[in-house]
Amino acid sequence: ILDGRHFYRDWQSICLLLSMLFCAGLIAGNGTVAHRFFELPPLIYLGKICYGLYLWHVPVFLIIRLNLKLGEAWEWTAGIAMTFLLASLSHFLVEQRALALRHKFG
């Protein structure tokens, strides 16, 4: 499903269209569906840990794929769970402390 021309043509077109609609909704004002969507607590939390997700996803998936030899569904399940766990831990144990130091020392 993620291989070939169909992925690039169909799925990326759908993602582009949805992104454009969300951007238009965000530009339109505070009461729009897009604003209410991005104010949902899970999305706010996702925004807080997004840098950690970016940093951790590649090493987590490489380690799982090279060492555990799971089926594809289990690789994705374990990879996503471990990535979220590590991103959350690094957010609270590293990033928050670094931000506290920045505020302390200006």
Image (cartoon, helix red, strand yellow):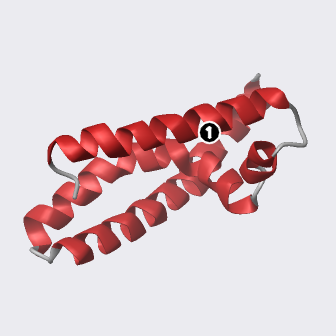
Coordinates of residue 81 in the picture (x, y in percent): 41, 70
Q: Position of residue 77 (x, y in %)?
A: 33, 73
Asked if residue 76 lies left or right of residue 54, the reply is left
Against 23, is 86 above or below? below
* SS at mark 1 in the image: helix
Q: Nearer the viewer, residue 95 or 68?
A: 68
Q: Position of residue 31 (x, y in %)?
A: 90, 43
Q: Quadrant of residue 8?
A: top left
* Residue under label 1: 98
Residue at 74%, 26% in the rendered image = 105
User: Residue at 18% across / 55% down in the picture?
Assistant: 62
Q: Quadrant of the N terminus?
A: bottom left
* Vertical arrangement, residue 82 with respect to residue 71, above or below: above
Q: Quadrant of the C terminus?
A: top right
Q: Is residue 66 left or right of residue 43?
A: left
Would residue 65 appear left or right of 28 to someone viewing this image? left
Vertical order, 103 against 44 (above or below): above
**Horizontal relation, residue 20 to residue 65: left or right:** right
The outermost residue toward the right is 31
Nearer to the camera, 29 or 84: 29
Q: Amino acid at mark 1?
A: Ala
Quarter of image, res 95: top right
Q: Looking at the rendering, which quadrant does residue 97 occupy?
A: top right
Residue 58 at x, y percent in the picture:
27, 48
Question: Label 1: few (<14), some or many (≥20) within 10 Å?
Answer: few
